[in-house]
Image (cartoon, rainbow, N blue to C red):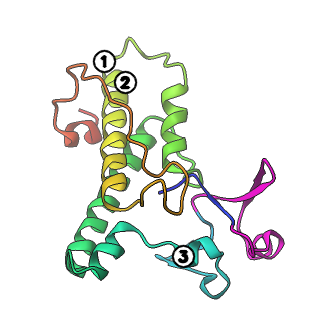
Amino acid sequence: MFHTVQLKPGDSARELAALGLKLKRKQGQHYILQPCPAFKESRCSIYAARPRRCRLFECRQLQRVEAGEITEAMALEQIQEVRRRVAELDELLSRAGSTNLKRPLSKRCEKVMADPPETLADPAAVELRSWLTRAMQELSVILNRDFRITPSGAGEGQGDEPPAVPDDGLLHRPKSSILAGT
């Protein structure tokens, strides 16, 4: 969901690095690079020693469940939808040549889109890039709307709306045909 997670006062960068977290120092602040290496098998492997930011964070789904706005089953359905979309993006990125699963999804997408496409003359490559752009934008909208908290909350850049994606006419084919390569 995030590119980096800033450590809060009281967190020991040295101790967290010893636990296997990948840290980056930027303008005097330490950040945990994402995806988090401590997140294994759908849970935190360092839960008892997790950073303060992680202890304090509650996504919108959890907030809405606790407020009685949605049921736990509804929240789990939304989580499954996001996971399905992430798997679809992984497949599109793989087809576009990005296979480094240790990098954040958005960074992998940015890299694919920034690479000069030698195959711009190939309609299938253009279409794949269009689908990738649209799928990333749709995922970002869902994450901003249903999971991330507002910018005044715990994270940086969490309320930003994704840029508009121009419709080049190639986006009306079923996604299954893109994933199948047809």
Q: Is residue 5 left or right of residue 83?
A: right
Q: Secondary structure at mark 2?
A: helix
Residue 123 - label: 1
**Which circle, 1 or 3, is nearer the viewer?**
3
Tell me the crowding category of disc 2: few under 14, some 14 to 19, or many 20 or more residues within 10 angstroms, Cα based.
some
Q: Residue at x 31, y 18 (%)?
A: 123
Is residue 5 covered in magenta? no
Q: Earlier in the sequence, mark 1 or mark 3?
A: 3
| Count of numbered labels shown in the rendering | 3
Q: Position of residue 3 (x, y in %)?
A: 57, 51
Q: Earlier in the sequence, mark 3 or mark 2?
A: 3
Q: Are marks 3 and 2 in contact (CB under 8 Å)?
A: no
Q: Is residue 21 left or right of residue 83?
A: right
Q: Residue at x 31, y 82 (%)?
A: 66
Relative to 85, does residue 137 appear above or below in the rendering? above
Q: Which residue is mark 3?
A: 56
Q: Which residue is mark 2?
A: 125
Cα–Cα span, label 1 and label 3:
47 Å
Amino acid of disc 1: Pro
Q: Are marks 1 and 2 in contact (CB under 8 Å)?
A: yes
